[in-house]
Amino acid sequence: MAYRFLLFLEVFIICIIPLGFSYPLVLSASALVLELYVLFFLGKVSNLRKGRLFMYFLGASAFVVELIWFILDLSYTVSYVDGFFALNQPALSLLRFTLWFFFFGLLLIRLIKSLIREPFVTTSVVMGAGAGYLMLGFVGGVLLNTIFYFHPLLSFLCLRILQLF
């Protein structure tokens, strides 16, 4: 059942991405909700016991950095009416990407291992596999956002190259 809710939450986040152009705080808030769901609900129903403490530590660290990111975006949006992107520190952007990459990478590995241990292929298992693919896309989106903060033209070129495929 947790696989289904994870997929529904990810699809909902994908549907509200266009709001992020008008309201940049929506994307940070949705990332916080996704991390909270993964930490509190998906971690408890996982049939994998090994490495759970490290997973919680990594997830809590990613949550704190994302919360700092959200607060910086909030202060920038409140102080500047026409704010489109907050001028956050590049080190925070790189730390955010690194934590997202390792946390969701470890989560994907754990998700695949738990899907392999399922005795039957049900709709929940298929939805869990779909949620894993969408999670990979979220990590790619955070990577693209990180590249944007370091070099905006490079992120534009990456988007153009991805559109060719």
Image (spheres, rainbow, N blue to C red):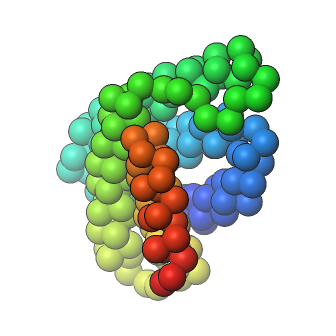
Front residue of 57 and 73: 73
Q: Residue at x 64, y 16 (%)?
A: 75
Q: Position of residue 98 (x, y in %)?
A: 31, 42
* 141 versus 43 height, above or below: below
Front residue of 86 and 54: 86
Horizontally, residue 162 falls left or right of residue 24, namely left
Q: Position of residue 23 (x, y in %)?
A: 75, 38
Horizontally, residue 64 falls left or right of residue 112, namely right
Q: In the rendered image, is residue 61 in sight? A: no
Q: Position of residue 95 (x, y in %)?
A: 33, 34
User: Across the whole image, how many numbered discs are drawn on residues?
Assistant: 0
Q: In the rendered image, is residue 71 in sight? A: yes
Q: Position of residue 79 (x, y in %)?
A: 71, 14
Name the outermost residue toward the front. Answer: 153
Q: Quadrant of residue 54?
A: top left
* 152 versus 117 height, above or below: above
Q: Residue at x 38, y 31 (%)?
A: 90
Horizontally, residue 71 falls left or right of residue 11, namely left
Q: Residue at x 48, y 26 (%)?
A: 88
Horizontally, residue 105 falls left or right of residue 17, namely left
Q: On the rendered image, what quadrant is the N terminus found in?
A: bottom right
